[in-house]
Amino acid sequence: MDKIRQTHIIDAPKSYMVIEEIFPSNEEYLPKVDKDEMDLIKNNKELESSYPIIMKWLHNPRTRNFIIIRENNFTLTFSCWRQIMGLNHLISTYFLTIGFDDGKNGKDEEIQKLVAEKRRRHYPCHPRCLRHPPAACVYFNFAQQQPPTPNLESTSMAHSLNFFLSTSTSPEFTHSCSKPMLQNPHRFVSLTKFSRKSVVLVSASADNGLGGLGLSAVTADYGSDNGSTIEVDAVTEAELKENGFRSTRRTKLVCTIGPATCGFEQLEALAVGGMNVARINMCHGTRDWHKAVIQKVRRLNEEKGYAVAIMMDTEGSEIHMGDLGGASSAKAEDGEVWTFSVRAYEALRPERCITVNYDGFAEDVRVGDELLVDGGMVRFEVIEKIGPDVKCLCTDPGLLLPRANLTFWRDGSLVRERNAMLPTISSKDWLDIDFGIAQGVDFIAVSFVKSAEVINHLKSYIKARSRDGVIAVISKIESIDSLKNLEEIIQASDGAMVARGDLGAQIPLEQVPLAQQKIVEVCRQLNKPVIVASQLLESMIEYPTPTRAEVADVSEAVRQRADALMLSGESAMGQFPDKALTVLRSVSLRIEKWWREEKRHEVMDLPDIASSFSDSISEEICNSAAKMANNLEVDALFVYTKNGHMASLLSRSRPDCPIFAFTTDTLVRRRLNLQWGLIPFRLDFSDDMETNVNKTFSLLKARGMIKSGDLVIAVSDMLQSIQVMNVP
Ligand SMILES: Nc1ncnc2c1ncn2[C@@H]1O[C@H](COP(=O)(O)OP(=O)(O)O)[C@@H](O)[C@H]1O
Ligand SMILES: C=C(OP(=O)(O)O)C(=O)O
């Protein structure tokens, strides 16, 4: 398959610019620039008149690079790696910097110094560049009039990162932190006028020691499918075909599987309705029951092409009631006396008697304490203790559900005595975790996490035992302790759940929304997926339509841009699981659409989270790719990801367009299914991005999921590259 490459300049600014080119010492990479040409450029007032010369340089067959310059206040700084398409001898470290200079304040020299400093600081670290240190620096000054002047910090930042893309709107424009330009949407605006017809490839690399960003124009004959396949679920495929990229839902949906939904057809109905993750709660049912559900979900995935992930939720050390002898609920009336007992009843339990799973219960409570079922759905007052039995008077009547959560309160405060010392992961939980590992579940959600320590411990346990060590650990934030240690817990985990049910039993209800907001924010900042759970559509357990307040609650979670929403009883034992899922789906779609139509942009500052230079480059690439996607109004972001990291970084930026995440690994595909905006595909691909992109285009086109003219940006974690292109 022969690729035709062209190099061209897309747009002509009326601009006065400094173009700075630095080449490796290897002469063969230097375009031939003679003095006359240089003089001609320097003397030209309008950059357009210099284009023929720039074009000539860029037509150097070894260069094939491409400059986009827009508006007279647009600064674009980047490094072009000549071999951007996957060849590993990336010694062609030609890079090009375009910056501004007002031509009169003597910045030239200072910039030259910074360039030299950069070389000194960065190139020696690059094994390949050690062999080919850049030696030549050609500096052209187009600036003779009054363009904006970037300060030297920004220039220096650009140089040190090899990655810099901005528009400057103000002559006073100053920067002191490391990468402000990419974070300010206003400075990026002029890129939105970027021609949609153009095809631009941008690539950067850090793993190979060549951190940088290059732009190159390519028109390509993408050829035909090489015979391999792409796996995506039928629902996404149909959505893409019928409604296009914009219609895909970004917020993911988790359904708790229970008696109402454990059959194959019921599970399939949920998958068709948009279930991304099936949650099994080890608090209920037997391991055999859960195993059967897991097997059905796996079958569904295999036979129907879904990527429904399995989340196993541990019971944890919460204090809860036992089941109700098979009854689905029991009504406690005002003034009735009920017995809460730690006895294990062999035979029939007496009437109005509830078992409690915590042995220390009768010792911990005192007469006068208040006993809350499910955070206050039903209230009792402790009136008498008789050995293992605690007699309680019902003060707030309501429905008792099997295994409902119990908390006890004294003088208005939650009692946290021996009950607070219970281990986060009980011995039963460890057995369940072994079961989960053996079954190859995708996520383990840990109940009542108190500290990061337990998560670290669990993660090493999983790593040592699971075949591929990739079960993601989700911390349920549902206690005062978990709120206290929120950041360290989330940092240690692979994601979090705002478990509002139990959380609302530990903190005043009016604080739950704020806690939710905070947890969602922290997760986003630390790049961990977050699930908002419990009582989203509680009334739909019994009724076919939600309350207005429930719809508003769902909307709020979508507006907060949580990764996922979760159904509990609504799907586990409710009468309308499919309808509840439909409500989540349609509210999510509507709010997401509103967000885009209103052109709302995040105000959230996303802090640097990378722990290495290579990770920083990935982060920069993803942040910029997402911004570019918004500004260029592209149709989709494509990410080629082996372990999912770059896909999640893109998701973290919550771009306007959907993110197609291509991965070779089925497990990664399922795991990505929990994250906001990601549409995970399984696809075999190589390290050669050009081949990957071509292959994806032809496969997706053949399936009718994309069409000629769609504009996409592709990034990759193998080469840490970005490409912007129209589907041919
Ligand atoms: N595997 C199961 N078997 C029976 N009932 C279940 C199962 N999973 C969930 N349920 C029912 O659905 C309700 C809501 O599920 P969930 O939110 O996971 O539980 P809980 O809030 O009780 O911890 C449960 O209280 C229980 O009645
Ligand atoms: C999701 C929750 O946990 P569980 O269903 O295990 O009580 C919750 O408490 O909100």
Image (cartoon, grey):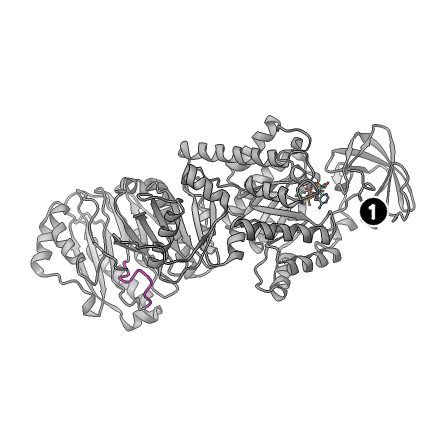
Name the residue located 64 percent from the left edge and 29 percent from the top edge: 544
Mark 1 = which residue? Answer: 361
Asked whether, in this view, residue 360 is left or right of residue 608, the answer is right
| Residue 286, image x, y percentages | 74, 51
Q: Which element is circle 1 on? A: helix
Q: Residue furthest left?
A: 36
Question: Residue 178's x, y, as percent?
Answer: 37, 53
Q: Is residue 691 left or right of residue 446?
A: left
Which portion, as a residue range, is magenta?
80-88
What amino acid type is highlighted by mark number 1?
Phe
Q: Dividing the image into four quarters, tell me where ligand 2 lies.
A: top right
Seen from the viewer's position, the closer of residues 232 and 111 is 232
Query: Of residues 397 and 689, which is closer to you in this image?
Result: 689
Residue lying at the far right of the rendered structure = 386
Instruction: Considering the whole magenta stretch, tell me its main secondary structure.
Output: loop
Residue 604 visible in the picture? no
Residue name at image x 33 percent, y 48 percent = 175
Q: Nearer the viewer, residue 257 or 97?
A: 257
In this rendering, the answer to whether 260 lies above or below 495 is: above
